[in-house]
Amino acid sequence: MAVTLLIIIGAAAGFIATRIMKVDTNVIVTVGVGVLGALIGGLLLRALVTVAAVAFGFIGAVLGAVFLIWFWQTYLGK
């Protein structure tokens, strides 16, 4: 089922990509371009999301630490 879905999505993505780039290809090449593009794009997007998640985690940790220091100084430090 996943392979069939990948082929269908790849065919649609390949069709759209070949129209955007104004390339005239046959059906097999269009589907192949779409499937390979989906794999490459998926890997790149997954890597980008992973890096962003680490960065946002770090920012959240710093903000949490700043809040904790503020809370400690405001309510517990006196």
Image (cartoon, rainbow, N blue to C red):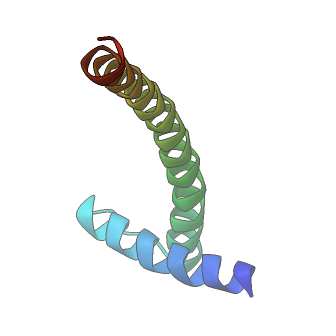
Residue closer to the observer: 22 or 47: 47
The picture quadrant where one finds residue 58 is top left
Q: Quadrant of the C terminus?
A: top left
Question: For this rendering, which residue is in front, 66 or 31?
Answer: 66
Placement of the N terminus among the 4 image quadrants? bottom right
The picture places residue 44, in percent across and down from the top left corner, at 52, 42
Question: Is 2 rendered above or below residue 22?
Answer: below
Is 33 on the left-hand or right-hand side of 74? right
Residue drawn at point x = 69 percent, y = 85 percent: 4
Q: Position of residue 32 (x, y in %)?
A: 59, 66
- Kindly indicate the quadrant of the structure image that contains residue 39: bottom right
Which residue appears at 62% of the width and 76% of the height?
6
Reply above or below: 50 against 3. Answer: above
Number of numbered discs on residues: 0
* Residue visible at 54% across and 39% down in the picture: 50
- Image location (x, y in percent) of residue 60: 40, 31
x, y percentage for residue 22?
25, 63
